[in-house]
Image (cartoon, rainbow, N blue to C red):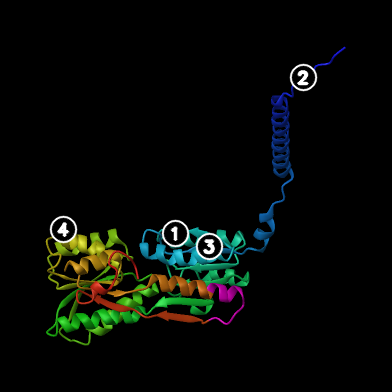
Amino acid sequence: MAFTKRPTDDSDSVHSYIHMINLMEMLLVICSIGTLILLFVIKPDFSVSQKEKSRLIGVTYMTMNNEFYEIVNEQISHRIEAQGDRVILRDPAMDPLRQQTQIEEMLEMGIDALVLTPVNAASLTDTLGKAKKQGVKIVVVDTELEDPLIADATIISDNYGAGQIIGNYHLMNHPDGSKVVVMTHEEAISGRERVKGFIDTIKTNKKTEIVEELPCEGQYDLAMLSLEKFIKSGEKFDGVFCLNDFSASGAASALEENDMLGAIELYGVDASPSAKRLISEGKMTASAAQFPTKLGAKAADALYDLLEENPTEKRVIVPIQLVTSRNVSIFTIDRWQ
């Protein structure tokens, strides 16, 4: 009997190979899914040890409706996050009692350090004394406390010098005297110092008269309303000094409403983007530039020097600079310094 050899079918080998590949792919998928499920069920919390080692930093400014504090906070918060620590930010919205309550709550949460700008320099003495007893490091930025010994570090601009530099510029423009309105914020030492620097300086000219001091808490709305009311009284004046540019913007609105913007000299402190714009347009006379990026960076340096128990400068004063129509072009108008 003769046997006939059947020709080899190459397609069988190809199918077998493809089948084997498919099986291997299925096994890999099953193993991957199983691994993911296992990790999901029994995964270790790698963040636990990190959280245990991280520090909790409380932060509170006067208000967060002022871009100045946003810039300061950016510098501080970025540093805290870069260090692997955690930040708690609270906004008291210019309410001293609310700020006190918020700090008490942060102390209960176990903060290791507190960065603050007090709404009222005198109202936090007892609360901050409690913080000191708990070993909390205290960094004050932008203004000071009534009892400066409570703070471990204070970072401020040359607030008295800001008033002085504006006062000298005003006297240069008015050697024969003038009538000035002053916008104040008595609860903040920074505000008091700026006003004092300005008044002490212009009083050197006996012909210069302060016709009114108007409280405004450094706020836009309050400054606008109080100056509008004063304008309606009919009292004549040549200029307005505002303790910050936020209130100067409010004063500018009141002056504009009464067709006086540009005719009445307007002064502020900060050199905020809006103030620099008004100066460049001839609608504001001058501002004493603060540098919030430097204030924030130096506050962050002080914070971590204290936490690491490194030598820390107790009081840091950041210089200011006069901004007028003559030099405003050297500044970036749409940004803070």
Crowd around label 4: few <14 · some 14–19 · many ≥20 (10 Å): few
Earlier-in-chain disc, 3 versus 1: 1
Three-letter amino acid code at the position of disc 4 = Glu
* Residue 207, picture quadrant: bottom left
Q: Separation of disc 3 and disc 2 at Cα?
A: 92 Å
Q: Separation of disc 4 and disc 2 at Cα?
A: 105 Å
SS class, disc 2 = loop
Residue 141: where, in percent of width, then height?
45, 72
Task: Describe residue 150's horizontal placement relative to residue 143 as left or right.
Answer: right
Q: Separation of disc 3 and disc 4 at Cα?
A: 40 Å
Three-letter amino acid code at the position of disc 2 = Arg
**Magenta-highlighted residues:** 303-312
Earlier-in-chain disc, 2 versus 1: 2
Q: Residue at x 53, y 76 (%)?
A: 150
Pointer 3 and pointer 1: residues touching (CB < 8 Å)? no
The answer, for residue 3, to whether it is visible in the render is: yes
- Indicate whether residue 310 is drawn in magenta: yes
Q: Separation of disc 2 and disc 1 at Cα?
A: 92 Å
Q: Residue at x 41, y 70 (%)?
A: 293
Closer to viewer: mark 4 or mark 2: 2
Pointer 4 and pointer 2: residues touching (CB < 8 Å)? no
Crowd around label 1: few <14 · some 14–19 · many ≥20 (10 Å): many
Residue 319: where, in percent of width, then height?
37, 80
Quadrant, the C terminus: bottom left
Q: According to the image, label 3 marks what residue?
A: 103
Three-letter amino acid code at the position of disc 3 = Ile
- Indicate whether residue 9 is drawn in magenta: no
Q: According to the image, label 4 marks what residue?
A: 257
Q: Which mark is residue 92?
A: 1
Pointer 3 and pointer 2: residues touching (CB < 8 Å)? no
Residue 266's place in the image compared with 37, above or below, is below
